[in-house]
């Protein structure tokens, strides 16, 4: 860990009881889900991480608790450093507070995660699907969502095929 | 029967002003099939007369599930999908993916491969900016720039075809180096382009930079400031046009960008004209970088010698049993990187282009997420467009240079 990152990492570790891990010179702090917003606020205000570079999620199906990891990647335009946050979420009802109030560009990122991964964001201003149609069934980036090679459903034979189609469960 | 539903005005109640509900302002649909949206972008525009009250971008018409598809392919095969993300910066897409895989596996690309990567990435930037200058001027009714810009763009695409056999979907940059060395004609072809480019950029500038019609339609329109840019995560030329000299090639150099002498062009106006000037200056800087890389282009191998990750050269397969085994294993099973996740980013013509790559130790990537600049720019579009004429909206979309493959993935 370099000199730019270690003050932020140690402060956050102390204050929010985070676990620090390092892989290929990247520092990742793992928080409890309810600690992410205060920790991100501190990171932005005190340590100058002014850009939310990416926000995404990883699905560890068939593991159920925790099933998902939220991944936040912050960048500082002054020290040119990245820092990663992670928070583990359970599979039965994955909910986490929105980061929109701290980093406004989390809005579309979280809409995308809701759309493709099915994680809900509490307090989000506009939680609609973003790339898929509003009445789409399921969340495609989940690991139990079938990948493809199913019969193509057209509007005229949608219901026939729907009866024999795998429903959000990966076939062995 | 299940038909695809659309959002109704009721679903968008929290985004439009109360005047839209009462019918005082007009809510209009623009796109997705509209020539000035540079792809399939749909905008729901709330208008008060001709003034834009709010813009609600509706994306997803080009969503192809690339991230999901990549999870089902080995690392080598998944790379083919990366070209299709930002189809105006294909070499850069390959590059950022390869940098992520290299970071994960610990591969190291040799100096010659690095120099060629720099040349190709900058050529990619050049052709993206050339298409941008053509189409965004076309949106503002300046027809002739498009024809000139496309002429030079063809020359760049010919160079891509020369090295990879493909004009756009190249997949030429591979984890650990390049697919193969560039052909002998590469140097003269790039040199020819580098020699004519500065004069050609002058030509485009003579058509636009002092053109009163162009100035009228670009100055003071689509303004955004540095603080808002950072808040919205906007990087690239749009951020640099607000006065912040920030470029990933300088900030976090990759592929040896720190060895090249180039400047970060900035403007302070933050409007369409500022972004135009920044991009034109960037084209000149790209030419400068290409020239330097070409002059110092070292000789040597273009691939890492780690046979567990990088396939052996064709010539060895016929004579070495070991090479044959490696070749067979790599193309049937793939390679297995260690468990962990990495994030790498490069400077695309539009801003930060990043890859989040998580591996579970199997030959297939467990999760890939592309952090693409267009989606961030599009999210900031309403902030730039509010209060301007609907005709200027077209110019603003052109000036942020979005690629819809990049937004939807």
Image: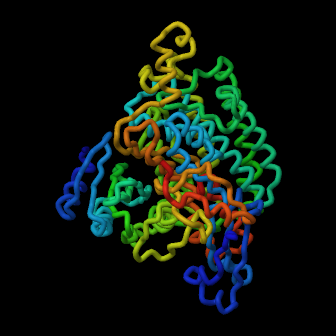
Can residue A33 be seen by looking at this rendering?
yes
Given residues B52 and A141, the one toward you in this image is: A141
Residue at 40% over, 73% down: A101
The residue lying at 41 percent from left, 54 percent from top is A58
Tell which residue pokes out farthest to the bottom in this image.
B22
Task: Find residue A5 and report its horizontal and vertical position in percent.
Answer: 27, 50
Q: Looking at this view, name the residue that lies furthest to the left.
A: A14
In-front residue for pair A10/B207: A10
Q: Is residue B117 left or right of residue A43?
A: right
Q: Is residue B45 left or right of residue A77?
A: right
Residue A24 is drawn in which quadrant? top left
Q: Tell me the quarter of the image containing the N terminus of chain B.
A: bottom right
Report x, y in % for residue B152: 74, 38
Please state if A1 lies on the left or on the right of B152 as rendered: left
Above or below B27: residue A79: above
Instruction: Using the image, determine if residue B150 lies above or below residue A121.
Output: above
Numbered circles on residues, count: 0
Colouring style: rainbow
- Tell which of B153 and A40 is nearer to you: A40
Q: Position of residue B56 (x, y in %)?
A: 62, 72
Q: Does residue B212 show up?
A: no
Residue at x 25% of width, y 44% of height:
A2
- Which sits in the foreground, B188 or B38? B38
Horizontal and vertical percent position of residue B176: 47, 28
Tell me the quarter of the picture where residue A61 sits.
bottom left
Q: Residue at x 41, y 33 (%)?
A: B336
């Amino acid at each position: 860990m370099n000199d730019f990152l270690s003050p932020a990492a140690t402060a956050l570790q102390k204050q929010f009881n985070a676990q620090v891990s390092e892989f290929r010179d990247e520092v990742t702090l793992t928080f409890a889900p309810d600690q992410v917003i205060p920790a991100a606020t501190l990171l932005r205000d005190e340590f100058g991480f002014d850009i939310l570079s990416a926000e995404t999620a990883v699905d560890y199906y068939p593991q159920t608790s925790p099933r998902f990891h939220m991944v936040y990647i912050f960048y500082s335009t002054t020290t040119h450093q990245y820092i990663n946050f992670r928070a583990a979420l359970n599979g039965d009802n994955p909910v986490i507070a929105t980061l929109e109030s701290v980093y406004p560009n989390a809005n579309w990122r979280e809409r995308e995660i809701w759309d493709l991964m099915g994680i809900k964001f509490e307090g989000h201003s506009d939680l609609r699907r973003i790339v898929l149609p509003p009445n789409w069934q399921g969340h495609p980036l989940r690991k139990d969502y079938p990948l493809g090679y199913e019969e193509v459903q057209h509007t005229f034979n949608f219901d026939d095929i729907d009866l024999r189609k795998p429903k959000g469960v990966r076939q062995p | 029967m299940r038909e695809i539903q659309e959002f109704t005005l009721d679903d968008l109640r929290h985004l439009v002003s109360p005047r839209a509900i009462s019918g005082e302002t007009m809510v209009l649909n623009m796109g997705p099939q509209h020539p000035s949206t540079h792809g399939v972008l749909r905008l729901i525009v709330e208008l008060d007369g001709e003034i834009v009250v709010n813009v609600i971008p509706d994306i997803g018409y080009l969503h192809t599930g690339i991230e999901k598809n990549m999870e089902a392919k080995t690392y080598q095969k998944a790379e083919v999908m990366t070209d299709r993300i930002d189809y105006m910066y294909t070499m850069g897409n390959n590059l950022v993916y390869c940098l992520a895989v290299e970071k994960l596996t610990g591969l190291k690309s040799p100096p010659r491969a690095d120099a060629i990567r720099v040349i190709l990435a900058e050529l990619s930037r050049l052709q993206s900016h050339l298409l941008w200058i053509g189409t965004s001027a076309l949106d503002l009714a300046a027809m002739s720039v498009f024809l000139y810009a496309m002429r030079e763009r063809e020359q760049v695409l010919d160079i891509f075809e020369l090295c990879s056999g493909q004009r756009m979907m190249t997949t030429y940059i591979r984890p650990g180096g390049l697919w193969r060395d560039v052909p002998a004609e590469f140097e003269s072809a790039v040199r020819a382009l580098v020699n004519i480019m500065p004069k050609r950029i002058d030509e485009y500038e003579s058509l636009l930079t002092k053109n009163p019609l162009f100035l009228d339609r670009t100055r003071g329109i689509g303004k955004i400031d540095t603080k808002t840019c950072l808040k919205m995560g906007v990087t690239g030329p749009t951020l640099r046009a607000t006065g912040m000299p920030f470029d990933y090639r300088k900030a976090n150099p990759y592929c040896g960008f720190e060895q090249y002498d180039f400047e970060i062009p900035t403007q302070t106006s933050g409007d369409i004209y500022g972004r135009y000037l920044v991009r034109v200056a960037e084209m000149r800087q790209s030419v400068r970088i290409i020239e330097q890389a070409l002059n110092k282009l070292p000789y040597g191998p273009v691939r890492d010698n780690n046979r567990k990750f990088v396939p052996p050269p064709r010539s060895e397969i016929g004579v070495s049993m070991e090479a044959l085994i490696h070749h067979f294993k790599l193309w049937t099973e793939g390679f297995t990187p260690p468990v962990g996740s990495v994030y790498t980013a490069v400077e695309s013509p539009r801003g930060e282009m990043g890859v989040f790559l998580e591996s579970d130790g199997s030959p297939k990537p467990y999760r890939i997420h592309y952090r693409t600049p267009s989606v961030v720019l599009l999210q900031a579009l309403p902030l730039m467009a509010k209060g301007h004429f609907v005709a200027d909206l077209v110019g603003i979309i052109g000036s942020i240079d979005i690629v819809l493959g990049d937004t939807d993935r």
